[in-house]
Image (tube, grey):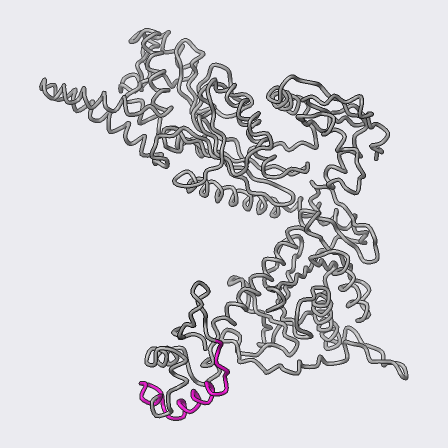
């Protein structure tokens, strides 16, 4: 690890003009390329106190051993040179997008004497006109098959073309009029090229001219009673319309635009691009990248623009580029795009209307692409094994943690405090083992105390299960010594009332508030074969908590109080993705490309999702609660009948028992129970219209 001060240039050496800089490592390899409006300010920012640098930037400057720069005259030149150097040197600390698959294009080889229409993949070639990309090659072939009726351009390979020219016989497409057969001289090279250029114009979005021309010729042929020719022209126009229908109109003003959306997390980003030509989506593609440098959404967009248009010219750069965030130097990027197009390019964020709606669709595609990428990455056995080995090495474990449990606390400003426990075995989620907890030991907001309570309750049950099965026996306490916590049954909360049986479980929650129910409908119902809830019988090799030093210390203290010393504990802090260990003042920083860090992040995010889902369901249930819920034997149908009859809970509270008995299905005993329940429940405070200050009458039948 190099000391940045050893190669720091003096401020007077660095010019204050625009330019591009390169960081090199000890082997003279370029590891990072950047650009700046002011080289002196930007380069100097890398040589501040390491504690103030982003972890990714810190890793880069300590890996480098020298820095050099090149001065340019404008910021646009800096942008172009940065792209050129990133492409040439492939620096390890620069964001580089990689295609999530090899997308096929519809290509027209205008660089040949007789242009050919074909499917092409891979790098683009000079002199070839490309359309797309398409999701599938068969979609290109269907489109071409429809359009060859009108534009009979050559589609055969060079070998087939030469063989037809040698024998003087065209291929099958030539006989069925889906090829103009330039191989046997039916058309001249100039006529065939004109067909190919018309084909390109139609694919580029200039569709109305050709369809109107065909319809005009059709009407003229019909007037001249050339009905066979008119029918052929009618079928040609129908073929072009069917080809157009394959891409629906998304922008009514026939816009040419590219829409770019980004979905990202702390480690990775997915990019989706929709290519709209003539108001129709003509192609789309997606990229995924590791965030190996400290970069925000605007930076990701700028890198994407460089990679998208760095090799393009002319109409390949559209009139409009719609993005989720503008690059830092929007004016320079816009000028660079305009130079490549040869005309003005609008780079902006859509604010309203169809373009904003379409951008939302592109954003959903980006989110799905990122989720699919994570799923594929997590399902690979070799990758999971490497991740577990990296975690074991980073945390100093004797073996790979085959079972990992992660805990998270969730609440809303101190209300409805809950916790979650998720389980990953062999790097995969084990949803049937998920558990959720209600915090019962205290009220209010205290994440550290909540974490201590949850870890203590979970592992008390683990020790009790071991004692039940005879795997562990706690020695009797010495004279004057307090009993082991596992031997002391948990005391019920003073205000706790045994809850009603859950309809799916048929049994109340345990006294400690642990909920064995699993939200995954595909998992089991969390019960043993004999109907008893499953015990916490299986210990993890690693406990992960969502948080930093305080949460890790609380979890470790809970385990120590139970005498458990063979389970490792760590915490993952979300802000910088640092891994904290008990009693360590400094975190463990895993590489950003580490599969181990990626697995820990997935475990933490799943625990957060599970906890917040439970917390929201509890809050929603509390908000929807009614005094009628406590009336024994009163089901949902009869509750609705009462509310419908009286209009509101307030009016029902004012009714007499005789009036309540008049509701169909309500007997006197039930009416007495309803009246008693409403009398014991304190009425809610009156609602106030915040705009007018008016006290509103209660008319909601679900609350009181």
Q: 56 or 131, which lies in front? A: 56
Indicate the position of residue 272 as horizontal and vertical percent values: 51, 37
Q: Going by the image, does 11 lie left or right of 102?
A: right
The stretch in magenta equals 660-685
Indicate the position of residue 265 as horizontal and vertical percent values: 61, 45
Q: Residue at x 79, y 63 (%)?
A: 556
Indicate the position of residue 94 as horizontal and vertical percent values: 67, 31
Q: Assess whether residue 628 is covered by the magenta stretch.
A: no
- Residue 672 figure quarter: bottom left
Q: Residue at x 44, y 63 (%)?
A: 691
- Residue 274 figure quarter: top left
User: In which quadrant of the rendered image does the N terminus lie?
Assistant: top right
Q: Going by the image, does 583 lie left or right of 637?
A: right
- Residue 562 figure quarter: bottom right
Indicate whether 181 appears above or below 573.
Answer: above
Q: Going by the image, does 216 lie left or right of 531?
A: left
The residue sitting at the right extreme is: 479
Indicate the position of residue 213 as horizontal and vertical percent values: 23, 20
User: In which quadrant of the rendered image does the C terminus lie?
Assistant: bottom left
Q: 699 or 267, which lies in front? A: 699
Q: 121 or 492, which lies in front? A: 492
How many discs mark residues in the rendered view? Answer: 0
Indicate whether 253 appears above or below 526.
Answer: above
Indicate whether 249 appears above or below 200.
Answer: below
């Amino acid at each position: 690890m190099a000391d940045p001060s050893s190669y720091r240039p003096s401020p007077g050496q660095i010019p204050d003009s625009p330019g591009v800089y390169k960081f090199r490592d000890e082997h003279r390899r370029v590891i990072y390329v950047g650009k700046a409006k002011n080289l002196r300010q930007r380069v100097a920012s890398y040589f501040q106190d390491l504690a103030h640098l982003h972890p990714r930037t810190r890793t880069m400057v300590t890996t480098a051993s020298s820095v050099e720069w090149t001065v340019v005259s404008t910021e646009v030149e800096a942008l172009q040179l940065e792209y050129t150097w990133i492409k040439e040197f492939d620096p390890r600390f620069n964001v580089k997008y990689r295609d999530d698959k090899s997308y096929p294009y519809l290509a027209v080889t205008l660089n040949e004497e007789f242009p050919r229409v074909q499917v092409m993949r891979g790098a683009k070639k000079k002199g070839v006109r490309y359309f797309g990309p398409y999701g599938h090659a068969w979609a290109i072939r269907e489109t071409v098959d429809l359009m060859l009726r009108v534009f009979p351009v050559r589609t055969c390979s060079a070998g087939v073309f030469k063989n037809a020219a040698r024998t003087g016989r065209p291929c099958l497409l030539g006989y069925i009029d889906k090829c103009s057969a330039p191989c046997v001289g039916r058309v001249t090279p100039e006529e065939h090229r004109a067909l190919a250029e018309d084909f390109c114009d139609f694919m580029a979005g200039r569709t109305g001219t050709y369809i109107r021309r065909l319809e005009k010729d059709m009407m003229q042929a019909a007037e001249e009673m050339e009905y066979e020719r008119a029918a052929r022209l009618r079928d040609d126009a129908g073929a072009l319309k069917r080809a157009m229908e394959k891409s629906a109109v998304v922008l009514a003003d026939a816009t040419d635009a590219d829409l770019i959306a980004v979905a990202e997390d702390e480690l990775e980003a997915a990019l989706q691009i929709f290519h709209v030509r003539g108001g129709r989506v003509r192609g789309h593609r997606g990229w995924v990248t590791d965030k190996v440098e400290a970069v925000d959404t605007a930076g990701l967009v700028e890198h994407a623009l460089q990679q998208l248009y760095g090799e393009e010219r002319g109409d390949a750069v559209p009139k409009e580029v719609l993005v989720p965030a503008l690059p830092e130097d929007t004016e320079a990027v816009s000028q660079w795009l305009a130079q490549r197009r040869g005309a003005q390019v609008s780079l902006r964020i859509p604010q309203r209307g169809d373009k904003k709606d379409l951008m939302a669709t592109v954003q959903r595609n980006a989110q799905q692409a990122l989720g699919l990428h994570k799923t594929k990455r997590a399902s690979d056995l070799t990758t999971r094994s490497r991740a577990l080995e990296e975690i074991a090495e980073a945390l100093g474990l004797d073996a790979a943690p085959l079972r990992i449990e992660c805990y998270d606390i969730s609440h809303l400003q101190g209300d409805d405090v809950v916790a979650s426990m998720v389980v990953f075995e062999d790097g995969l989620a084990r949803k049937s083992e998920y558990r959720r907890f209600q915090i019962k030991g205290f009220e209010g907001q205290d994440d550290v105390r909540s974490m201590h309570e949850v870890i203590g309750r979970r592992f008390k049950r683990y020790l009790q299960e071991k004692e039940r099965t005879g795997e562990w026996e706690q020695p009797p306490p010495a004279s004057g010594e307090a009993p082991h916590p596992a031997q002391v049954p948990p005391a019920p909360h003073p205000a706790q009332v045994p809850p009603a049986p859950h309809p799916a479980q048929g049994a109340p929650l345990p006294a400690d508030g642990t909920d064995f129910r699993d939200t995954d409908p595909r998992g089991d119902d969390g019960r043993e074969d004999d109907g008893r809830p499953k015990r916490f019988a299986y210990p993890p090799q690693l406990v992960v908590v969502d948080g930093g030093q305080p949460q890790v210390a609380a979890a470790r203290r809970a385990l120590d109080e139970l005498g458990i010393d063979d389970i490792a504990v760590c915490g993952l802090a979300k802000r910088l993705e640092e891994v904290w260990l008990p009693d360590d003042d400094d975190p463990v920083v895993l590489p950003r490309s580490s599969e181990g860090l990626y697995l820990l992040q997935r475990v933490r995010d799943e625990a957060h999702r599970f906890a917040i889902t439970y917390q929201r369901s509890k809050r929603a249930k509390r908000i929807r609660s009614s005094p009628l819920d406590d009336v024994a034997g009163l089901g949902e149908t009869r509750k609705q009948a009462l509310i419908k009859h009286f209009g509101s809970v307030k009016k029902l509270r004012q009714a007499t028992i005789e009036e309540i008995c008049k509701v169909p299905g309500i007997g006197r005993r039930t009416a007495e129970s309803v009246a008693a329940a409403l009398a014991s429940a304190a009425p809610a405070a009156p609602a106030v219209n915040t705009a007018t200050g008016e006290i509103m009458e209660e008319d909601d039948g679900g609350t009181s």
